[in-house]
Image: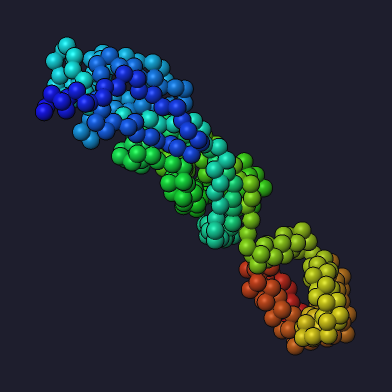
Amino acid sequence: MALMDFLKKQFIDVIEWTEDGDEVLAWRYPMQDREIQNGASLTVRESQFAVFVNEGRIADAFGPGRYTLNTNTLPLLTNLRNWDKLFQSPFKSDVYFFSSRQRLDQRWGTSQPVTLRDKEFGAVRVRAFGNYAFHIADPKVFHAQVSGTRDVYRMADLDGQLRGLVVQEMANGVAASGIAFLDLAANQNMFAKVLTDALAPAFMALGLKLDTLTVQSLSLPDELQKILDQRIGMGMVGNDMGKFIQYQTGQAIPKMADGVAGGGGIAGDAMGLGAGVALGQVLAQNLQKGLSGAAAPAAAAESVKADDVVATIEKLHDLKTKGILSDAEFDAKKAELLKKLT
């Protein structure tokens, strides 16, 4: 009976893998009821690795080439099995093939805004997306850490994990770089390099190499983008109060037009804003005269009422709360206004 079982066994003379499709990363050669003949041929094609596993332990790994399997080509496996030097008998071992081709155009992106620590703004919430490419660089690590003993391991099994890694390391990488958000947004190549440097160790721990990573979009949520736009506008006008009032007027005109056309509550808000702008223009004229060193007559000084100054300070405080004015800008303008009451 034992002799019949031995005769029924199939001996493998050629071991190879012709990849079927682009989605398979790892594939186990079918070994059920089969043994590898001494002197069998192993063919590993370009962009492939082959790994021999004996009783759960990784023995030998092969890069591209054609090999005749014997004690010279399988030294670790021979030692594990304690074969004699002749190595004449067939042997049983698991053989795994790995595709080391680059996996191009893998997409990543933030499903929700990610909070980043920024040296200029303190903290910002950003959205970003792009693509990346990688390949299996260390099949032993990939087998031990990722694919394991599965017959087939596909791209779909790994995609979610890698996209999560990119998003996870995005915040850490940007914070560690110390580069301001505005600089990153203006130079997406710089942002991509920061991410690549942060992600490389995490990919290597899985036996992978991150080849390229691109950032195709980097943006703020709409409400934060509006505040940033207003702050940029204020930066353009500087400390010129006249230009500041002109800027605020320009911001208010579209709202007033919409309110008049719609006839709703927005119109009332716009009218209130317009009144504040008109008041600000009067005060700005007086402030500019004072700053230019011109001697103002006593009657002009009396025209600036305490209630008007307080109302203007309150409006400036509202702009500071919204992030349009910085604390320093608010304090400076407040001090200028209070001087008019003395």
Q: Is residue 219 above or below residue 48?
A: below
Query: Closest to the observer: 141 or 327?
Result: 141
Look at 83% across and 69% down and name the residue there: 250
Q: How is the image coloured?
A: rainbow
Q: Is residue 172 above or below residue 329?
A: above
Q: Position of residue 171 (x, y in %)?
A: 50, 53
Could you tell whether 86 is left or right of 306 in the image? left
Query: Closest to the observer: 335 or 194?
Result: 194
Q: Is residue 37 above or below residue 291?
A: above
Could you tell whether 199 is left or right of 222 in the image? left
Quarter of the rendering containing residue 291:
bottom right
Look at 33% across and 41% down and name the residue there: 150
Q: Position of residue 187 (x, y in %)?
A: 65, 44
- Position of the N terminus by quadrant: top left
Look at 83% across and 77% down and name the residue there: 258
Q: Position of residue 10 (x, y in %)?
A: 26, 24
- Position of the C terminus by quadrant: bottom right
Residue 152 at least partly seen: yes
Q: Residue furthest left?
A: 1
Q: Position of residue 135 (x, y in %)?
A: 47, 34
Quarter of the rendering containing residue 40:
top left
- Count up the numbered dots: 0
Could you tell whether 290 is left or right of 32 in the image? right
Look at 54% across and 58% down and name the residue there: 111
Residue 328 at least partly seen: no
